[in-house]
Image (cartoon, coloured by chain):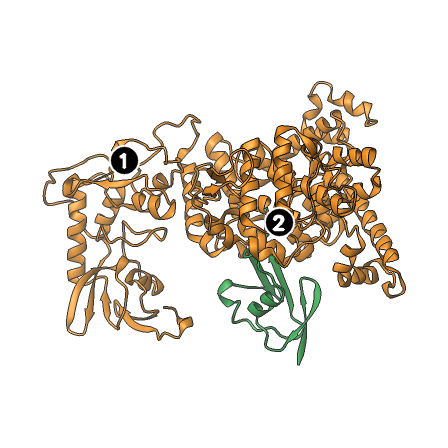
């Protein structure tokens, strides 16, 4: 019960000091609140109190009754007096520690606690004396963390009394152990440690500390923040819709009344798997989710119950709302068959969204799709195209070529308007867009458009910073963000480290840091990781330079491959603004306001077509100005090519043929 | 009486006595990772419900970057 529910607080005294607490608060927590430290060994905020070591014993007096209890798991329910230093308390604590010291005399944490309790040494010999300084003291932190925090059950106690020990099933590491090392990180004695490390880190202890902090944050904070341990990235679906950012009907709209049908709770209800997979040391985010027993309704495996890995947010958005599909089972089925056939759910979804809009606009019809109804929302048609793509048959043979080639095919075969298809075909550099509406964030338009591999958001996701927070209002501000974030996020890829640990969980005091959006403490955590691995100290700035070197080299590589100039950073107008009249009308208030306040024209005196044209001119012009600012910030020419000075400063000019390649594209001294 | 405050650089009209928590609901700011400042003073998480806004207040709701 909390104070919010109107429960009266309890008055207790601890060592004579009055403390007011919520009923149910443990003595350990109440003492901490009063600034009194009670020694404890088997306690950690990451796991449920256990009371096994009994080091935290204290004396509680209620009325005439006094007894010794363990502070970590004794909930305060009535007024009482607690003594952490009474003779009886100290005698109990000393005896507990004396027995531990007799059994594990060289374990530092036991030695320290015994010394603090005034013990010189044990008065008796223990029959199971273990002189190992890293002996297991049976505190059970590892067993509980593996079960409660990591959601695995790899570790367990075996035996009773003096024979009790921590072990794994049949004494062997089971396949379910993902090696997250949370057990080693929480072990107070070093009994569990990396026995073999193929990477031979320079400072394993530093990495262990970084990993332990990560485990602590993920286990303790995610449940109050993004709930990614429960729902994975699918938690974003309803949030993106709230901000008008969820792609619906081929990126026409950012929200839809049917979104609650595919909100995260609907997938949480069908997720049957989702434990930490050990992909990053110390991370127990457990972001990967899976659905067991999905009975397929279509395709070659129809009728079979299968395991589906996902769905994640991108699948729910690109292959769900973006197609007007709001049925969780259908999204799960698309997810399964995309994986089964080796197709990407983002590209597949964005391809079908384009196809559906073309069908709706009359570019396609049943005759042209081989008899398929591909209207927005058509589940049957979507799944059939998916199967056809895999078989290389029918309309699937066309759709499987992607949006860029489809535009050409539809113009050549069906006489479609190339300008319309260019506007609504959500691809750049030949890659389909990922799952965010970026019409109202110029910075994100650049984040997508300039991205080296095509419009993926893993270089930069600046929508909140730009559109909601209004933190980067000028072209220069946006260019700075489009320098820092793409370099930073490229760094994760270079090092094979996950991005979720950077900003999908946030330290408790992040708000008070100098740059909360950059999550400075987590950036430092990555620096610690690098230094621990390599033995070389690095600063956050060093990491950016590491990326810049590779990023610029990749840009030159793109140039060589025919994708590295300004013209290749062009984006479809659907990514910049409303293409159709109905899109404009759906957010008319917003667009009219922009025309009036930003463009400086009077919308009341204009027709809808005139307003759309004026808005388009303004938005297209701003995108070009953004490219100018970004290229300048990155040390590139106006055509988007790294200058000689830039490649020299990064030391990549020594790559054979690089300077000549730049010269062939007009970049010289 | 209505107040005029500034939320993320834009004017916002709201009812007198509105708290920061109510403002977040009004603006549908549902993303969980946010840092909030009122007149450049940090509003800690446990103060969001108790902090009442006044006419002319400048509110910054910094959504931490996310996605992907």
User: What hue does chain B carry in this figure?
Assistant: green
Q: Is residue A565 above or below residue B47?
A: above
Name the residue carrying label 2. A325
Q: Is residue A395 above or below residue B25?
A: above
Q: Nearer the viewer, mark 1 or mark 2?
A: 2
- Residue at x 16% of width, y 61% of height: A87
Q: Nearer the viewer, residue A416 or A248?
A: A416
Q: Mark 1 vs mark 2: same chain? A: yes
Q: Nearer the viewer, residue A342 or A286?
A: A342
Sequence-wise first label, 1 or 2: 1
- Residue at x 18% of width, y 45% of height: A100
- Residue at x 49% of width, y 30% of height: A534
Q: Secondary structure at mark 2?
A: loop
Q: Mark 2 and mark 1 in contact (Cβ < 8 Å)? A: no
Q: Nearer the viewer, residue A294 or A198?
A: A294
Residue A46 image position (x, y, % from top left)? 37, 51
Asked if residue A589 can be seen in this view, the reply is yes
Instruction: State which quarter of the image contains the C terminus of chain A.
Output: top right
Chain seen in orange: A
- Residue at x 57% of width, y 46% of height: A313
Name the residue carrying label 1. A169
């Amino acid at each position: 019960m909390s104070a919010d529910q109107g429960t009266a607080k309890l008055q207790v005294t601890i060592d004579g000091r009055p403390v007011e607490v919520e009923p149910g608060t443990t003595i350990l927590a109440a003492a901490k609140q009063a600034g009194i430290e009670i020694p404890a060994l088997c306690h950690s905020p990451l796991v449920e109190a256990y009371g096994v070591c009994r080091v935290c014993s204290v004396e509680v007096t209620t009325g005439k009754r006094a007894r010794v209890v363990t502070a970590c798991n004794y909930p305060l329910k009535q007024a009482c007096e607690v003594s952490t230093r009474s003779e009886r308390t100290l005698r109990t604590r000393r005896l507990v520690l004396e027995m531990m010291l007799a059994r594990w005399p060289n374990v530092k944490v036991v030695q320290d606690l015994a010394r603090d309790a005034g013990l010189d040494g044990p008065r008796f010999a223990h029959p199971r004396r273990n002189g190992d300084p890293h002996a297991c003291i049976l505190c059970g932190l590892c067993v509980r963390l593996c079960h409660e925090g990591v959601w695995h059950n790899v570790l367990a106690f075996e035996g009773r009394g003096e024979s009790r020990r921590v072990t794994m099933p049949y004494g062997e590491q089971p396949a379910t152990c993902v090696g997250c090392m949370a057990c080693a990180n929480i072990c107070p004695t070093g009994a569990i440690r990396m026995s073999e490390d193929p990477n031979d880190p320079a400072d394993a202890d530093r990495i262990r500390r970084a990993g332990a902090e990560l485990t602590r944050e993920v286990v303790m904070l995610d449940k109050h923040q993004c709930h990614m341990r429960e729902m994975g990235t699918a938690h974003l679906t309803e949030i993106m819709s709230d901000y008008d950012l969820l792609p619906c009907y081929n990126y026409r709209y950012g929200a839809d009344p049917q979104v609650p049908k595919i909100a995260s709770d609907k997938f949480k209800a069908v997720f049957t798997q989702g434990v930490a997979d050990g992909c990053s040391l110390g991370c127990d985010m457990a972001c990967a989710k899976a659905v067991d027993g999905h009975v397929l309704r279509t395709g070659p495996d129809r009728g079979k119950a299968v395991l589906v890995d996902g769905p994640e947010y991108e699948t729910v958005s690109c292959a769900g709302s973006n197609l007007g599909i709001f049925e969780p089972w259908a999204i799960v089925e698309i997810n399964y068959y995309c994986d089964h056939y080796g197709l990407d759910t983002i590209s597949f979804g964005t391809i079908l969204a384009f196809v559906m809009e073309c069908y709706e606009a009359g570019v396609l019809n049943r005759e042209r799709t081989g008899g398929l109804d591909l209207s927005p929302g058509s589940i049957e048609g979507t799944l059939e195209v998916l199967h056809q793509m895999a078989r290389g048959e029918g309309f699937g043979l066309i759709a499987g070529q992607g949006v860029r080639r489809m535009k050409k095919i539809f113009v050549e075969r069906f006489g479609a308007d190339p300008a319309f298809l260019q506007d609504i075909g959500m691809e750049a550099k030949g890659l389909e867009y990922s799952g965010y509406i970026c019409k109202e964030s110029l910075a994100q338009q650049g984040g997508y458009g300039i991205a080296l591999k095509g419009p993926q958001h893993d270089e930069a996701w600046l929508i909140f910073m730009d559109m909601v927070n209004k933190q980067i209002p000028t072209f220069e501000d946006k260019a700075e963000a489009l320098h820092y974030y793409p370099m930073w996020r490229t760094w994760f890829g270079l090092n094979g480290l996950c991005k979720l640990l950077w900003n999908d969980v946030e330290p408790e005091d992040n708000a008070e840091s100098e740059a909360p959006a950059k999550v400075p403490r987590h950036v430092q955590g990555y620096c610690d990781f690098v230094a621990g691995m390599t033995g070389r100290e690095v600063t956050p700035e060093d990491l950016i330079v590491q990326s810049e070197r590779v990023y610029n080299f990749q840009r030159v590589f793109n140039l060589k491959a025919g994708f590295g100039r300004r013209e290749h950073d062009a984006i479809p107008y659907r990514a910049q603004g409303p293409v159709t009249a109905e899109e404009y009308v759906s957010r008319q208030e917003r667009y009219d306001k922009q025309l009036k306040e930003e463009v400086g024209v009077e919308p009341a005196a204009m027709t809808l077509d005139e307003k759309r044209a004026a808005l388009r001119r303004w938005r297209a012009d701003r995108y070009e100005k953004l490219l100018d600012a970004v290229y300048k910030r990155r040390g590139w020419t106006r055509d988007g090519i790294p200058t000689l000075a830039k490649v020299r400063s990064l030391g990549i000019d020594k790559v054979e043929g690089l300077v000549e390649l730049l010269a062939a594209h007009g970049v010289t001294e | 009486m209505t107040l005029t405050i500034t939320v993320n650089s834009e004017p916002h009209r709201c009812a007198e006595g509105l708290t920061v928590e109510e403002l977040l609901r009004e603006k549908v700011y549902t993303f969980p990772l946010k840092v909030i400042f009122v007149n450049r003073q940090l509003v800690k998480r446990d103060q969001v419900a108790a902090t009442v806004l006044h006419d002319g207040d400048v509110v910054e709701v910094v959504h931490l970057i996310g996605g992907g």
